[in-house]
Image (cartoon, grey):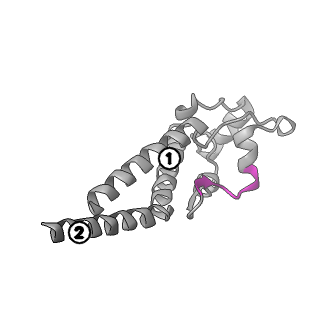
């Protein structure tokens, strides 16, 4: 019996070491978080800001121009803004962002350009909840796989 106990303790330690070392690498769960945030952002575009309470309607002049151009959706003229959002993830960070300069003005507003804020990105609360939910899933999956 004594030999079996020693073998089990050694195996348990090996599994704990593997679990500990796997938890140091956050790239996989961070990629999962980034994918969730990307999905949310695309849905928010499709629903014209409904996920953040709806976007401010365009001015009458802009509405007429969009009508002439055959464009109906808010914040969509060429599709470049929506397409500019990309997920990013590494061992330390996960997120969604756009490098287009004018994305900032639409997200936060620009009174000098007569642009109201039309938030395209998830709220901080949603980002935090998503991170917790994904990491909870990831850790439970690791426990099932390793133990």
The answer to whether any part of residue 122 appears in the image is yes
Residue hosting label 2: 6
Residue hosting label 1: 131
Label 1 crowd (10 A; few <14 / some 14-19 / many >=20):
many
Camera-nearest label, 2 or 1:
2
Query: What is the distance, in whole Å, between disc 2 and disc 1 at their CAs?
Result: 39 Å
Q: Is residue 114 above or below residue 121?
A: above
Residue 45: image quadrant is: top right
Q: Position of residue 120 (x, y in %)?
A: 61, 42
Q: Position of residue 33 (x, y in %)?
A: 49, 52
Residue at x 67% of width, y 34% of height: 63
Magenta region: 93-102
Residue at x 40% of width, y 47% of height: 136
Instruction: Return the residue nearer the eye: 135 or 60.
Output: 135
The answer to whether any part of residue 123 appears in the image is no
Q: Position of residue 30 (x, y in %)?
A: 50, 57
């Amino acid at each position: 019996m004594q030999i079996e106990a020693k073998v089990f303790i050694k195996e348990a330690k090996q599994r704990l070491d593997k679990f500990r070392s796997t938890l140091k690498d956050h790239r996989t769960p961070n990629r999962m978080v980034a994918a969730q945030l990307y999905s949310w952002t695309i849905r928010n575009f499709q629903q014209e800001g409904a996920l953040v309470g709806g976007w401010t309607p365009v001015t009458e002049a802009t509405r007429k121009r969009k009508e002439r151009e055959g464009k109906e959706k808010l914040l969509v003229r060429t599709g470049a803004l929506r397409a500019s959002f990309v997920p990013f993830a590494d061992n330390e960070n996960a997120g969604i962002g756009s490098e287009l300069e004018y994305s900032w003005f639409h997200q936060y507003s620009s009174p000098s350009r007569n642009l109201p804020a039309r938030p395209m990105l998830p709220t901080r609360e949603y980002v935090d909840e998503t991170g917790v939910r994904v990491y909870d899933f990831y850790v439970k999956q690791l426990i099932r796989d390793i133990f």
